[in-house]
Amino acid sequence: MANIFAKTHPVVWLRRLVQTFFLFLFFDLLLETTFHPIDKVGGPVTFFFELDPLVMISTFIAAHTVPAALLLSLIVMGVTLLFGRWFCGWACPFGALHNFFTSLRDWKRKDRILHGGYTRWNKAKYYVLIAFLTGGILGVNAVGWLDPFSFFYRSFSTSILPAINHGLTGFFTWAYETDPGVGSARLTSVTEPVYSVLRERFLDPEPYFYQGGFLIGVLFIAIVALNLFRVRFWCRYICPLGALLGVTGKNPIVRVQKDEDHCNGCNLCAADCQGGANPHVTGGWKPTECFYCYNCVSACPSNSIRIVSNDKEEKR
């Protein structure tokens, strides 16, 4: 795992903790909707969709009205307008998953520096956003295909969870029917209590499958695997919500600043940059691509990378 246990800034550990919280919250709400009747589901199971400004905009384009619950996404837009794409780096559960698989890469430092910066392919997500919004105006509401929460939810509910359910149910059924063991020590003495607990919350004794689930699962696994090719591949090149937040937060009041007087030119700040925001390029930092992950600040050996307000940058 690349640098995950290296000496890091406390803010990086805080960000990882927050990301983990939102990822587990997403899975908890997912299980609520997957394994319980909709009229018996408690809590805000649509929380992440209500936070999604892309869902709000596409709904308005399609229906010319916005449900009151979706107005919660205006908070995300407001925070992004002021502070940039913090949501992508801190609160997006799909981004947290990509971040985890990115950490599994075992690239050499020079390769991470070489591929950590901005490229013209970062613009691809903006074209994806334009295509979907144009389609919505023309009456084709296809945003749900690549909206991160819709894609994440659909992939897990129709493919990943059914596959896990089928595998675990098959194992526990085999253990119950064969009851292997040595002498009086039987495997079922362990598996049956575990199975009873999992049935309450996770497992369905009758495996369920969805048409197209296999294809959706293959696509999901392929997209996640692309993190081994480029850091947060989906977030950099595909995500339409990330593109929307990038446009919204292109002039934030907080910025990444490099102190040329202390910089030693090592470019380590680019090695673990999640968005390809070019923190190593003097005057070339790109707020539309920055997730404020704090990796650049943490990686800098000369403490020449800082996150500052616009006022401080102007006075410098």
Image: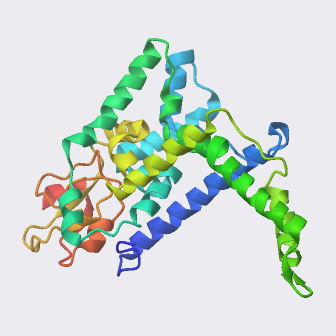
- Residue visible at 42% across and 50% down in the picture: 88
| Circle count | 0
- Residue visible at 74% across and 60% down in the picture: 168
- Residue visible at 13% across and 67% down in the picture: 259
Q: How is the image coloured?
A: rainbow
Q: Residue 218 location, x and y as percent?
A: 52, 44
Q: Residue furthest right?
A: 184
- Residue visible at 78% across and 57% down in the picture: 170
Q: Nearer the viewer, residue 221 or 184?
A: 184
Question: Is residue 307 something that shows in the picture?
Answer: yes
Q: Is residue 241 above or below residue 224?
A: above
Q: Is residue 230 above or below residue 140?
A: below
Name the side, left or right, on which 216 lies relative to 135. right
Q: Residue furthest bottom?
A: 183
Q: Nearer the viewer, residue 129 or 71?
A: 129
> Which quadrant, please, contains the N terminus?
bottom left
Q: Residue 22 location, x and y as percent?
A: 57, 57
Q: Residue 222 location, x and y as percent?
A: 45, 47
Q: Nearer the viewer, residue 304 or 281?
A: 281
